Amino acid sequence: MAEYAILIYTPASADPAEITPEDRARLERGARAEADTGAMLAAFELQAASTATSIRGDALTDGPFIEAKEVIAGFCVIEAPDLDAALEIARGNPALALGAGIEVRPVFGGFVAGRSTG
């Protein structure tokens, strides 16, 4: 099966610490449901973009790499037979109902702790 990254975008000013307990529970239920299908390989929520440190050459800067209206708030990696199936899985992500944008991208290659991918 092919692997796909699902990238979840929110406004750059969004702070995950400000998510209501009800919305957090909704997101966690969605993640558990995906994990239960066996499609989800990994999922991570990122801290606010303001906590990022960017590296470019020898320079370190606080904040995200570029100025943007939206930033990646989290991502997951799933297995699906094809792009259509991956899109269907992504459409079920409850972050969409909370105003997030989602990008689905095929994984080219990589590794997960002792396991080849791609």
Image (cartoon, rainbow, N blue to C red):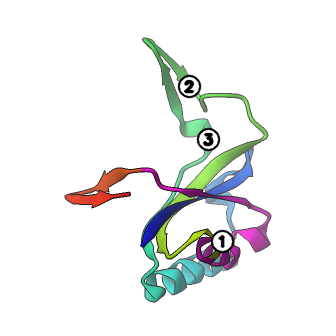
Choose between 45 and 25: the one closer to the eye: 45
Question: Residue 81: x and y, percent?
Answer: 50, 76
Q: Are marks 2 and 1 in contact (CB under 8 Å)?
A: no
Question: Residue 114: x and y, percent?
Answer: 19, 58
Q: Secondary structure at mark 1?
A: helix
Marks 2 and 1, Cα distance to the nearest angstrom? Answer: 34 Å
Above or below, comparing residue 62 to residue 104 in the picture = above
Choose between 37 and 50: the one closer to the eye: 37
Give the crowd class for mark 3: few <14, some 14-19, many >=20 residues within 10 Å. Answer: many
Which residue is at 45% across, 81% downward?
Answer: 35
Q: Are marks 3 and 1 in contact (CB under 8 Å)?
A: no
Q: Earlier in the sequence, mark 3 or mark 2?
A: 3
The residue that disc 3 covers is 49
Q: Amino acid at mark 3?
A: Ala
Magenta-colored span = 85-108
The residue that disc 1 covers is 87
Q: Secondary structure at mark 2?
A: strand
The residue that disc 2 covers is 62
Q: Quadrant of the N terminus?
A: bottom left
Q: Let me know if residue 110 is in the magenta part.
A: no
